[in-house]
Structures are given as C-alpha cells and as structure tokens.
Image (spheres, rainbow, N blue to C red):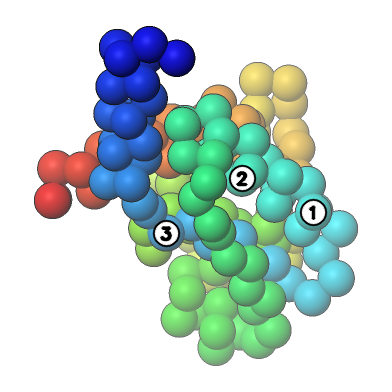
Amino acid sequence: MDHQDHQEHQEHQEHTNHGHIRVEVLVVPDCPHQEPAEERVRQALADAGLGGQAFTTRVIADEAEAERTGFLGSPSIHVDGRDPFAPPGGAKPALTCRLYRTPDGLDGVPDRAALRRAIETAARSGDSAD
C-alpha cells in the first residue's frame, strides 16, 4: 500500500469512527424474521462503510415495553433511537408482526438500500454533532 492509499484508508477509518450510531433490532419472542433482520442490518452497515459497527437485538415482551420503545411490530429497526420506517403520521405501538414495502413487494424485513440510506443519514447527523 503506497502512502496515498494508506492515507485514504486512514481517512475512511476516521470517518467510520466519527459515524458511530446506535442500531437496534427489536423483536417479539420467537420472531421468524429476527435472523433475516439481523443479517439485513449487517449488510446495510457494511454497505454504509460501517461494517465494524455493533448493533443490539432486544426482545419486546409486553405492551408496556412496546409503548415505551415505540415498537411498531416485529422486527423493527431503530437507528439512533428512531424508527426510520415508521409510517407518516405515526402508528400505534403493538406486539405484532410487521411487513415492509420494498421494491419487490411486501417483505418481513426492510429494503437493504433503504436501511443503508437511514444508517448513512444518521451517521452524517452524528458527524455534524462532533
């Protein structure tokens, strides 16, 4: 690796460090889409240049917790504490399965490109707060 390549690699790593965001997968117990949602988050983080970024998975077990977290169905993915796929005007939190509109039709997990865009937007917001 020459000096310029090394410098570009370091700048990418620094951007990645500044772009730290909180990503959380929220699911009901035994959600059949938990693993696909976790894999979609891994893919979207990697696509956004944040492949080393950790995320958490939280099981939402009751209505009170669904209310507290703004849980709109399983799986939900929150980026920096908000649901980027919440419908306009909001929705009532509930312990239910969730479907996402994707370019290929309804799916149990959000579209990979849409999730990457949500992650990139949050990472840029975090960069400007530094």
Q: Residue under circle 2?
A: 41
Residue at 29% in and 36% down? 15
> Please, is residue 28 above or below residue 75 in the view?
below
Disc 3 marks a residue whose amino acid type is: Arg
Instruction: Point out residue 61 in the picture as x, y percentages from the top left corner.
Output: 69, 84
- Point out the tag, 2 or 3, that comes first from the N-terminus: 3
Residue at x 55%, y 88% (from the top left corner): 64
Place residue 66 in its image quadrant.
bottom right
Pick the residue in front: 94 or 78.
78
Q: Residues within 10 Å of mark 1 (few under 14, many from 20)?
A: few
Question: Which residue has dot 1 on it?
Answer: 35
Tell me which amino acid carries mark 1: Glu
Q: Earlier in the sequence, mark 1 or mark 3?
A: 3
Q: CA distance from mark 1 to mark 3?
A: 18 Å
Q: Quick one: label 3, few (<14), some, or many (20+) residues within 10 Å?
A: some
Looking at numbered disc 2 in the image, what kind of residue is underneath it? Val
User: Residue 106: x percent and y percent?
Assistant: 74, 34
Residue 122 visible at all: no
Secondary structure beneath dot 3 equals loop
Nearest the camera: 102 or 20?
Answer: 20
The answer to whether residue 121 is left or right of residue 116 is: left
